[in-house]
Amino acid sequence: MANYTFSDGEIPISIRKILKHSKLIILLLVLAFIGMSSFFQIDPEEVGVITRFGKYERTVEPGLNFKFPLIEKVVKVPVERQQKLEFGFRTRRAGVRTQYASKTITDESLMLTGDLNLANVEWVIQYRISDPYKYLFKVRNPKSTLRDISEAAMREIVGNRTVNEVLTVGRSEVSTKVEELIQNICNDYSLGVKIEQVVLQDVNPPDPVKEAFNAVNEAQQKKSTLINQAKSEYNKVIPKARGQAKETVQKAKGYATARVNNAQGEVARFNALYKEYIKAPQVTRQRIYLETMEQVIPKLGNKIITDDKVTNILPLLQMQLNQRK
């Protein structure tokens, strides 16, 4: 094959045009690259953290923003989005959990309580990124660090309570205490997150002892039921008996008061009568006799008053009998 060389004055016009257009295309590509790498969009729920040669430079708000190409980079941080960490289970999609196939997932939920019992505790941490600078630059692997903090806090709180408290009445208190402890540790580490809620999903005894634990719970519930029934009967009978006792005592006091008042009245009456009797014994005696007869005679029915000198009373009695018939 023959080789051809051209001097500057011998380059064909077509080749010159191609070289000229290729330079223009390269320039346009460079300008397009610079434009595309200089402007970027931040979504409404995010902020952009600008770094220059790896060092924090500034934070930009949502919207269209500018950065120097090549020397500056942007990291988008979802500060308005609520994020969550799951412990003891993983959600594959909405409403569907894992089947606990991973030993790591199972181990993170198995905890020792304060009374040396075991419990499977599943919970969710809901949080937001409150300070993008701290979240990106103060702690390495902040999400993994937050997971370790949450697990340590839950084990501490559960370890200070009995298994019954964790499984039943103490669940809300456990959630509150864990939330406070996680937030305090995050503040100490300058993690830049705000813990919004700690939700205990399921708290159960381990599978090998679940049946025995359920039997104990049933016995305790039965005990509580019997105690409540006994208290109910007590509240029905004892107040009624106390009321009856008070009623009897009040009746006795009223009866005693009435008897005392009657006796005092009789005494006063007798004393007044005695004073009058002393003044005129014969007159008083006659008056008392007449008053007594006035009360007694009306109760006798037919009355026959005789004198020791009266005779022939039988015909009178016979006539009264005939009148009755």
Image (cartoon, grey):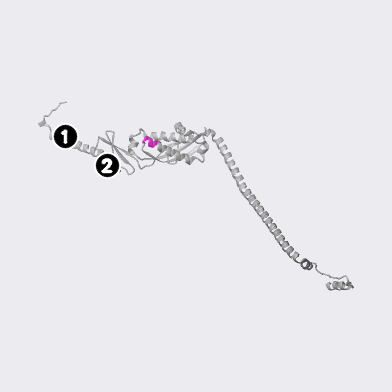
- Magenta: main secondary structure: helix
Looking at the picture, how far across and down is residue 15, in whole percent?
15, 34
Determine whether 178 is above or below 246 in the image.
above
The residue to which callout 1 is attached is 19
Q: Residue at x 21, y 36 (%)?
A: 30
Query: Magenta region: which residues?
Result: 185-190
Verify whether residue 187 appears in magenta.
yes
Q: Is residue 313 left or right of residue 69?
A: right
Q: Residue at x 32, y 41 (%)?
A: 47
Q: Position of residue 239 (x, y in %)?
A: 62, 50
Which type of secondary structure does the marked residue at label 2 adopt?
strand
The answer to which quarter of the image holds residue 71 is top left
For residue 48, side relative to residue 220 (left or right): left
The furthest residue to the front:
279
| Type of amino acid under label 1 | Leu
Quarter of the figure with residue 132: top left
- The one nearer the camera, 233 or 203, is 233
Q: Nearer the viewer, residue 22 or 42?
A: 42
As drawn, which residue projects farthest toward the left? 9
Q: Quadrant of residue 316?
A: bottom right
Q: Which mark is residue 286?
A: none
- Provide residue 255's location: percent of width, then percent of height: 68, 56
Residue type (three-letter) at the residue carrying disc 2? Asn
In which quadrant will I find the C terminus? bottom right
Q: CA distance from mark 2 to mark 1?
A: 36 Å
Where residue 151 sits: x, y (%)?
Answer: 44, 34
- Mark 2 Cα shell of 10 Å, populated few (<14), some (14-19), many (≥20): few
- Any part of residue 86 in sight: yes
Q: Is residue 179 magenta?
A: no
Q: What residue does disc 2 label? A: 65
